Image: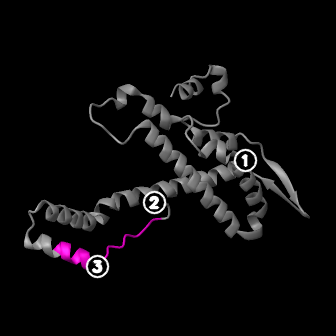
């Protein structure tokens, strides 16, 4: 956290060179507004990891979209793939300081436009457009993940019912309903669907 605080506490002259405001982590750092006596999963580390994972997933989706666009976005795809691969280990792997997703986006936003020639084709590489695509995808990713998380309790009701019945049968206090559930469970194996990340 100290290394992140040092990055945030820049001089006024350095603030003019920022590509965007980093309000997400700043709001979490505000200890007066977030002070609570209750435990919460909404911690700085969880927020930062969520933002980092959503950014990486959106980068992958943008790259897939560029591939699907064919020759229209081929040069942009090749440039951005190389740009991402050069920074992937530094930005997205391992335990590092907070704000890595913001660092990646800021570096991309500060990259000047350039032209790339492949064969007889010349194309303008517009990092601002690529950053815009990433942010649009990140919004979609976070909306999808929010919907998935909101459905988690409903999807786990059946699993919890079977687990409770099994625990009750082991404790010796089972009702006829519990016995029927345990018997049903022994006869039919429960197949759980796995998501994309499992």
**Of helix, strand and loop, which one carries label 3?**
loop
Query: Tag 2 or tag 3, which sits nearer the N-term?
Result: 2
Query: Tag 1 or tag 2, which sits nearer the N-term?
Result: 1
The picture quadrant where one finds residue 22 is top right
Whether residue 183 is in magenta: the answer is: yes
Mark 1 packing: few (<14 Cα in 10 Å), some, or many (20+)?
A: few
Q: Is residue 172 above or below residue 19?
A: below
Q: Nearer the viewer, mark 3 or mark 2?
A: 3
Q: CA distance from mark 2 to mark 1?
A: 28 Å
**Of helix, strand and loop, which one carries label 2?**
helix
Q: Which residues are magenta?
A: 181-195
Q: Nearer the viewer, mark 2 or mark 1?
A: 1
Mark 2 packing: few (<14 Cα in 10 Å), some, or many (20+)?
A: few
Count of numbered badges drawn on the protein: 3
**Of helix, strand and loop, which one carries label 1?**
helix
- The residue pinned by badge 3 equals 188
Q: Is residue 113 above or below residue 192?
A: above
Residue at x 34%, y 62% (from the top left corner): 151
Mark 3 packing: few (<14 Cα in 10 Å), some, or many (20+)?
A: few
- Give residue 1's position: percent from left, percent from top: 50, 28
- Give residue 76's position: percent from left, percent from top: 75, 58
Residue contact between numbered discs 3 and 1, judged by CB atoms under 8 Å: no
- The residue pinned by badge 2 equals 144
Whether residue 95 is in magenta: the answer is: no
Query: Farthest bottom residue?
Result: 187
- The residue pinned by badge 1 equals 86
């Amino acid at each position: 956290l100290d290394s992140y605080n040092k990055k945030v506490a820049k001089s006024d002259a350095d603030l003019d060179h920022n590509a965007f405001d980093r309000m997400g982590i700043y709001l979490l750092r505000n200890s007066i507004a977030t002070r609570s006596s209750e435990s919460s999963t909404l911690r700085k580390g969880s927020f930062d990891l969520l933002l980092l994972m959503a950014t990486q997933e959106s980068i992958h989706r943008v790259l897939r979209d560029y591939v699907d666009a064919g020759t229209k976005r081929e040069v942009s795809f090749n440039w951005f793939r190389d740009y991402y691969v050069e920074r992937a280990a530094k930005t997205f792997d391992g335990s590092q300081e907070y704000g890595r997703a913001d660092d990646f986006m800021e570096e991309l936003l500060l990259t000047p436009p350039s032209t790339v020639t492949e064969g007889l084709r010349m194309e303008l590489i517009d990092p601002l457009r690529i950053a815009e695509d990433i942010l649009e995808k990140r919004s979609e990713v976070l909306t999808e993940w929010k919907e998935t998380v909101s459905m988690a309790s409903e999807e786990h009701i059946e699993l919890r019912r079977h687990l409770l019945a099994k625990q009750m049968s082991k404790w010796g206090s089972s009702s006829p309903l519990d016995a029927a559930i345990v018997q049903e469970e022994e006869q039919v194996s429960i197949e759980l669907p796995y998501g994309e990340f499992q």
